[in-house]
């Protein structure tokens, strides 16, 4: 039981972890978990469990690195590894973030489809609306609306429970590492890792901890925050898989559009499931679509040593605004290509995330062990071994996917 | 420029290659810090230190020593030394005149009084592009030079060493410059700075920090997400 002063301190610190965790349950996240459950039932559930453990591990590192050094991820990579490696890190972040932003706008398009609105209207409107709110600094007024909308996905918990999960199968799926050695199964596994431990989440949680001016004394509470956020992500993810495994998987339904995915909410919402799913998808997409371009713009400016903020005019911070515009325009353009398939965009962008995650987690591993930068807060042997295990599994996953993707081309 | 020397061969008086230049050590003091030693990398994990007195020349093609390898004295690293690649290059600094945090793209070295001295840093786009191998683009991009006496190293070792140097720039900061610096540094570093400077200046800077909005840290997400900030303790 925390003492009163402890509770007050906890509430002052809570934020980065829960927010970063919650926004991991974004449109591509929901889609990926749905595909995992619909196509593989409970078989790949253990991947979600491992991803959640990795999420706790690396978000804790990110928050700690931010608190101790007072710097963001891209800047620290440059300080520790120099300009060339920083270019690799920033390029990875930029590509992954364009992919994920694209997926968020695909989420907007998909929820538009459910409501019968064409994507040529919904996507540009969302992009312009969100950018205007963010750039004019009035976003915080409606932030809670988006947050509320994205908590709609907590209804998966109810839907999953009503569907009556086979708990023994759930338990077995969580602990028995079973993986069919096919390209599509590996793709689903990789995308699950890439959406749970998203590259942008790493950059975001670190910057946000810097922003809050937390001190090393707050790290204890920050850990509670990180674990809470990650567990929320994991639990919601778990119930999405459960709901899909109980409704879609037995019927042999694969997810081809948002309507398919929405059926997993039927046990709870019946005919309202599509409406509920669409509203949740829209809220989660808009929340993430507003943070992603901004986070990317900060990372790029930071690596270049330009301390930019929303208070600066475009003339004062050209790199910042150019990056912001690049991310939004490129993402919208891809989604608006006539006939661009939304579910593959939502899903494949997350597998791309996992690939681009590799260099970033290696950098984080190196920085967190560096006593020059981290002092007494550097990772010890146990922490390092755990991060190394995550890096090894991720590399194995990505490598195997690469081999299975190339093999058919050779034979 | 430091980056033009790093990785270049270090050759002894007999023409034998000792290794490649890994870093330059400087000693902080009342004037522009003089280079005191070279760190030479010899193979994957071994390196050796060569005192500046043993260096005949240092240019874009590399370093030439006055002595043969076997004549080189063994010098241990000195206490108050800064390693330019490790502690200055790519590190975050506070530009006192421009009142902003920025990052060192390259280090400018000047030959003076028979030695090599650290004179300034370049925080512009040109050194970044040059180091990425984009020479032609770099020539069109700009350099932004900050004099060594106008900056405070915001990171780890450099920050601590500068605090201990009585003549370091931050000891001559005005209270409002100090308030700005402290607001931008991580909280723990900021209080170290306040402890290191004159108590009267520190007290005034603390007051200014509470009063003036300009001295507040710049938030990345503060304008779009509600940050419940901790009250300054």
Image (cartoon, rainbow, N blue to C red):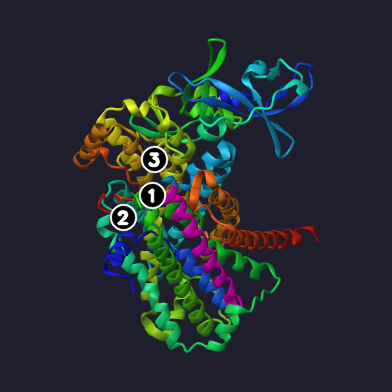
Q: Secondary structure at mark 3?
A: helix
* Disc 3 residue crowd, few under 14, some 14–19, many 20+, Cα 10 Å: many
Q: Is residue A48 visible to us here?
A: yes
Q: Which residue is mark 3?
A: A321
Mark pair 2, 1: CA separation: 14 Å
Q: Is residue A101 visible to us here?
A: no
Which residue: 74% across, 36% down?
Answer: B43
The quarter of the displayed image where residue B59 is located: top right
Q: Looking at the image, which is closer to me, B13 or A173? A: B13
Q: Which residue is mark 2?
A: B225
Does A180 sit left or right of A57 as displayed?
right
Q: Which residues lie in the magenta part?
A: A39-68
Residue B209: x and y in percent read 24, 40
Does B120 sit left or right of A143 as displayed?
right
Magenta stretch encompasses residue B147 = no
**Image disc number at residue A210:** 1
Position of the C terminus of chain A, as image quadrant, is bottom right
Which residue: 39% across, 48% down?
Answer: A294
Magenta stretch encompasses residue A61 = yes
Residue A359: x and y in percent read 60, 50
Q: Looking at the image, which is closer to me, B129 or A68? A: A68
Q: Looking at the image, which is closer to me, A58 or B23? A: B23
Which residue: 76% across, 16% down?
Answer: B13
Q: How many marks?
A: 3
Which residue: 56% across, 88% down?
Answer: A168
Q: Secondary structure at mark 2?
A: loop
């Amino acid at each position: 039981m925390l003492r009163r002063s402890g509770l007050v301190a906890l509430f002052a610190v809570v934020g980065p972890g829960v927010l970063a965790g919650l926004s991991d349950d974004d449109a591509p996240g929901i889609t990926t978990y749905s595909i995992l459950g619909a196509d593989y039932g409970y078989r790949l559930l253990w991947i979600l469990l491992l991803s959640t453990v990795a999420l706790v591990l690396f978000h804790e590192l990110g928050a700690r690195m931010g608190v101790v050094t007072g710097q963001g991820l891209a800047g620290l990579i440059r300080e520790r590894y120099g300009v060339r490696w920083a270019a690799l890190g920033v390029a990875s972040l930029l590509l992954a973030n364009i992919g994920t932003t694209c997926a968020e706008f695909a989420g907007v398009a998909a929820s538009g489809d459910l409501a019968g609105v064409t994507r040529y209207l919904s996507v540009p409107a969302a992009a312009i609306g969100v950018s205007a709110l963010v750039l004019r600094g009035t976003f915080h007024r409606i932030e809670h609306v988006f947050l509320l909308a994205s908590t709609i996905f907590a209804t998966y918990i109810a839907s999953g429970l009503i569907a009556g999960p086979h708990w023994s199968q759930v338990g077995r799926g969580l602990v028995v590492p079973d993986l069919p050695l096919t390209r599509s199964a590996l793709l689903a596994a990789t995308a699950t890792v890439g959406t749970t431990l998203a590259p942008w989440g790493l950059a975001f949680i670190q910057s946000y901890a810097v922003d809050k001016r937390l001190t090393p004394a707050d790290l204890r509470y920050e850990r509670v925050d990180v674990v809470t956020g990650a567990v929320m992500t994991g639990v919601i993810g778990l119930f999405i898989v459960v709901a899909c495994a109980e409704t879609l998987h037995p019927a042999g339904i694969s997810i081809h559009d948002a309507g398919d995915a929405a059926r997993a909410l039927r046990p709870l919402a019946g005919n309202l499931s599509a409406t509920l799913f669409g509203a949740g998808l829209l809220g989660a997409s808009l929340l993430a679509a507003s943070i992603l371009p901004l986070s990317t713009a900060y990372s790029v400016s930071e690596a270049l040593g330009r301390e930019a903020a929303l208070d600066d005019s475009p003339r004062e911070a050209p790199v910042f605004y150019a990056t912001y515009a690049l991310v939004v325009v490129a993402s919208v353009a891809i989604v608006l290509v006539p006939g661009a398939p939304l579910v593959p965009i939502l899903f494949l962008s997350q597998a791309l995330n996992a690939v681009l995650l590799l260099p970033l987690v290696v950098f984080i591993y190196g920085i967190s062990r560096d006593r020059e930068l981290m002092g007494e807060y550097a990772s010890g042997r146990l922490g390092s071994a755990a991060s190394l295990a995550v890096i090894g599994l991720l590399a194995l996953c990505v490598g195997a996917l690469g081999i299975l993707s190339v093999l058919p081309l050779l034979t | 420029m430091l980056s033009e020397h790093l990785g270049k061969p270090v050759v002894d008086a007999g023409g034998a290659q000792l290794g490649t230049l890994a870093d330059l050590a400087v000693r902080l003091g009342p004037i522009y810090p003089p280079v005191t030693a070279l760190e030479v990398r010899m193979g994957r994990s071994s390196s050796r230190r060569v005192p500046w007195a043993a260096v005949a020349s240092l240019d874009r093609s590399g370093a030439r020593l006055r002595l043969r390898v076997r004549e080189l004295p063994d010098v241990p690293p000195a206490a108050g030394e800064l390693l330019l690649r490790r502690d200055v290059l790519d590190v975050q600094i506070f530009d006192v005149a421009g009142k902003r945090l920025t990052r060192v793209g390259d280090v400018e070295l000047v030959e003076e009084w028979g030695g090599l001295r650290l004179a300034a840093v370049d925080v512009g786009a040109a050194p970044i592009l040059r180091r990425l191998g984009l020479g032609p683009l770099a020539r069109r991009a700009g350099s932004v030079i900050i004099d060594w006496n106008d900056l405070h190293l915001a990171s780890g070792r450099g920050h601590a060493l500068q605090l201990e140097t009585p003549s370091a720039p931050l000891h001559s900061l005005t209270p409002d410059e100090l308030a700005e610096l402290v607001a931008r540094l991580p909280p723990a570093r900021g209080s170290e700075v306040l402890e290191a400077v004159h108590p009267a200046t520190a007290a005034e800077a603390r007051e200014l920090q509470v009063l003036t909005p300009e001295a507040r840290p710049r938030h990345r997400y503060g304008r779009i997400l509600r940050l419940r900030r901790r009250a300054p303790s």
